[in-house]
Amino acid sequence: MENSIVQEILEKQVLTVAKAVEDKIDDEIAAIDRLDLDDLEALRERRLQQMKKMAEKRSRWISLGHGEYSEIPVEKDFFSIVKASDRVVCHFYRDNWPCKVMDKHLGILAKQHIETRFVKINAEKSPFLAEKLKIVVLPTLALIKNAKVDDYVVGFDELGGTDEFSTEELEERLAKCQVIFYEGESSINASKSNAQTRRSVRQSTRSDSSDSE
């Protein structure tokens, strides 16, 4: 009789301890869940703030003429343009074939790198600037950061010495000066890769659709 009473008491104690442990574990799990949710919310909030700031930057860049390759009409406008944007690529050109080749590549990069202003100015109609910046060979790119010329790309010597250089080669040269944002993969290649991926997905979808029919 006593053994059965003792057994019952022990069972109740075990159940009580088990319940306490279970409650404690439940509380800890709930605390972890709350912590994770808070962390996720904090990350989400930070991400939203980053996206908001980037959207504001993009809006400002576009308002300043970023995203397009444009011509500076008169020499004096050069100074206000380089002061307004942190990063500027300015092509000093004249009406010849090498400069037209450079125009083609810069037009592509202007759309790919909205963070940088891409402009061109006729060197022959800008004698003060050409002399001040020691522009002799055309085409010459002045790579400008924070309103100061940081580097130059003179002619095609750094681009293989030929007018058959690729846009990617010019992009890498500009990245070397950090006048554009660049993370190791050409934005042009990335765009092509994305386009190929989209085409592949569409083709796969069509194939699946045909198989199901």
Image (spheres, rainbow, N blue to C red):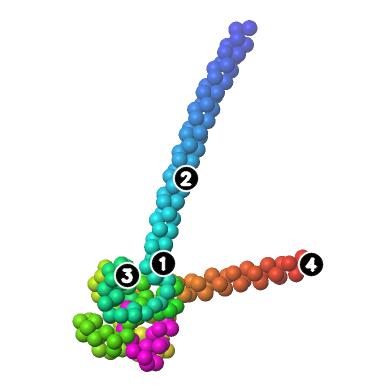
Q: Could you give the CA–CA distance between mark 2 and mark 4, rounded to whole angstroms? A: 44 Å
Q: Which mark is residue 62?
A: 1
Q: Secondary structure at mark 1?
A: helix
Q: Quadrant of residue 213?
A: bottom right
Give the mark nearer the N terminus: 4 vs 3.
Answer: 3
Q: Spatial distance from mark 1 to mark 3, Cα to Cα? A: 13 Å
Q: CA distance from mark 4 to mark 3?
A: 54 Å
Looking at the image, which residue sits at the far bottom?
96
Tell me the crowding category of disc 4: few under 14, some 14 to 19, or many 20 or more residues within 10 angstroms, Cα based.
few
Mark 4: which secondary structure? loop
> For this rendering, which residue is in front, 185 or 120?
120
Decide if residue 53 is in sight here: yes
Q: Nearer the viewer, mark 1 or mark 3?
A: 1
The part of the chain drawn in magenta is 90-105
Identity of the amino acid at label 2?
Leu
The residue tagged 3 is 87
Q: Which mark is residue 40?
A: 2
10 Å crowding of disc 1: few (<14), some (14-19), many (20+): some
Q: What is the distance, in whole Å, between disc 2 and disc 1 at their CAs?
A: 32 Å
Earlier-in-chain disc, 3 versus 2: 2
Instruction: Label 3, secondary structure: give it.
Output: strand
Q: Position of residue 135 (x, y in %)?
A: 25, 85
Tell me, yes or no, whether the highlighted magenta stretch contains residue 98. yes
User: Which numbered mark, 4 or 1, is in the foreground of this view?
Assistant: 1
The outermost residue toward the right is: 213
Mark earlier in primary sequence (4, 1): 1
Q: Amino acid at mark 4?
A: Glu
Q: For this rendering, which residue is in front, 165 or 57?
A: 57
